[in-house]
Amino acid sequence: MKQIVEQLRKFRKERDWEQFHTPEALARALIVEAAELNELFLWGEDGSQERIAEELADVFIYALNMADICGFDVKEIIQNKIAKNAVKYPAKKEVKSEAVNPLPQKQ
């Protein structure tokens, strides 16, 4: 993860994009990229694995950039959230259901 964050920092710096990467701007960009990912499934049409991967990568890139700019340790905040969710949603209370529209299988 550290190597990826370093690559993102280098990419940002080489293009002088630090000036644009405020938490607010990154949050907005993250929403746009999440919407583009969602668009792949609009009207029940599944996106190709390649397009899903590209849009998901964009979401991760903006999320990692935002975490870096805000000074968060990604591993730590994810582990903390998983722990909170485990308390909020105990496994024995959750009901399993079949996915309505599962992801397309790799071919």
Image (cartoon, rainbow, N blue to C red):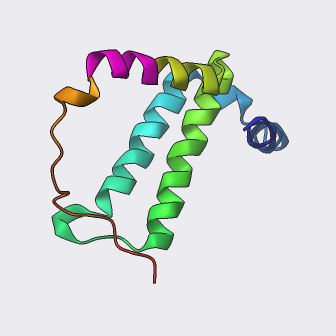
Report x, y in % for residue 94: 19, 33
Residue drawn 22% across the image and 28% down it: 92
Magenta stretch prevailing secondary structure = helix
Q: Residue furthest front?
A: 92
Note whether 73 is above or below 42 in the view shown: above
The front one of 34 and 72 is: 72
Taking the magenta stretch, the answer to whether it contains residue 88 is yes
Q: How many marks?
A: 0
Note whether 22 is above or below 30 in the view shown: above
Q: Quadrant of residue 10?
A: top right
Taking the magenta stretch, the answer to whether it contains residue 36 is no
The part of the chain drawn in magenta is: 82-89
Note whether 11 is above or below 78 in the view shown: below
Q: Which quadrant does the N terminus fall into?
A: top right
Note whether 75 is above or below 100 in the view shown: above
The front one of 43 and 14 is: 43
The front one of 53 and 29 is: 53
Residue drawn 62% across the image and 26% down it: 74
Q: In the shown orientation, is residue 67 left or right of residue 27?
A: right
Residue drawn 49% across the image and 53% down it: 56
Q: Quadrant of residue 12?
A: top right
Report x, y in % for residue 99: 20, 57
Report x, y in % for residue 51: 46, 68
